[in-house]
Amino acid sequence: MANKKLLKMVVLAMLVALGVVISPILRVEGMCPMAHFINITCAVLLGPWYALLCAFLIGVIRMTVMGIPPLALTGAVFGAFLSGIFYRLSKGRIIFAVLGEIIGTGLIGSVLSYPVMTIFWGRTDLTWFFYVPSFISGTLIGGSIAFIFLKQLIKAALLPKYQAALGSTVYDTPNTVLTDALGIGFIGIIAYLAVLVLVKNLLNMTGAAVTVLPVLAFLIFAAIGCIYYLSKKDGNRSETVK
């Protein structure tokens, strides 16, 4: 037990260091995709509390060393924790870990960033939904990378081994293709909301664009979910025949 706790701390330190190093990749203010990749990976490997601590430490280091605004915290800690919670509640389904990150960061973190940036950073040109589109975009990119990475670990039968070695819960619940496809479709609803906020509240667009663009965003993810289901379902059938 002591060795597993020590190993957890070592892995946590490695993820914090990795998060600090790779966070500048693809980063603009309000969008840091690789931080979300680290959040989800840590949540799956170590659990919600370690993921929360990891996100907090990365945020503090980035703020202290790199001069990043408080978005380094508001855009990470809520998603990291909810990613671990959703992963546990779903009994080990990766897509729900991704959804937890998207909801925690893309919705909760983005809205709470408004008062934090206004009070502590002196930004007076913001609105409550200013960071919603960029936060959700970042979580979609980082979440997609984490989803593919963790799925490959499952396919190689490595994820359960890593979790067992770390003393984390290993779930026997299969990550079914249908569940993943439905999860991708649900992400489309969040994308719909993000685009709606973008075109209506930030870009001040009117007319058909306010209706068409959010629906288009949803349909894209719905199509991705359908394609994912059909392609993976055929693959599973082929493996069964073999």
Image: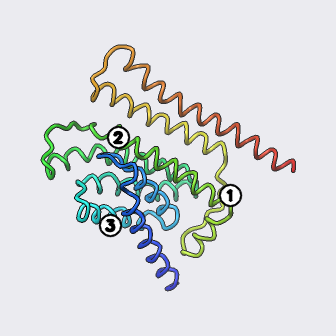
Residue 240 percent location from the top left of the image: 83, 49
Residue 43 percent location from the top left of the image: 47, 61
| CB atoms of marks 3 and 2 within 8 Å | no
Judging by the rendered image, the residue that carries numbered circle 1 is 155
Which image quadrant for residue 151?
bottom right
Q: Amino acid at mark 3?
A: Leu
- Rendered view: 47 above or below 190: below
Q: Secondary structure at mark 3?
A: helix
Residue 134 percent location from the top left of the image: 35, 40
In depth, the one of 63 and 40 nearer the eye is 63
Residue drawn at point x = 52 percent, y = 51 percent:
145
Judging by the rendered image, the residue that carries numbered circle 2 is 134
Q: Residues within 10 Å of mark 3 (few under 14, many from 20)?
A: many
Q: Secondary structure at mark 2?
A: helix
Q: Which mark is residue 73?
A: none
Judging by the rendered image, the residue that carries numbered circle 3 is 57
Q: Is residue 71 left or right of residue 39?
A: left
Residue 156 percent location from the top left of the image: 68, 62
Residue that protrudes farthest toward the top in the picture: 207
Q: Earlier in the sequence, mark 2 or mark 1?
A: 2
Residue drawn at point x = 23 percent, y = 64 percent:
64
| CB atoms of marks 2 and 1 within 8 Å | no
Q: Earlier in the sequence, mark 3 or mark 2?
A: 3
How many numbered tags mark residues here?
3
Residue drawn at point x = 27 percent, y = 52 percent:
71
Q: Amino acid at mark 1?
A: Lys
Q: Amino acid at mark 2?
A: Ser
Q: Is residue 56 left or right of residue 225?
A: left
Residue drawn at point x = 24 percent, y = 54 percent:
70
Q: Residues within 10 Å of mark 1 (few under 14, many from 20)?
A: few
- Gap between marks 2 and 1 measured at Cα: 31 Å
- Gap between marks 1 and 3 measured at Cα: 31 Å
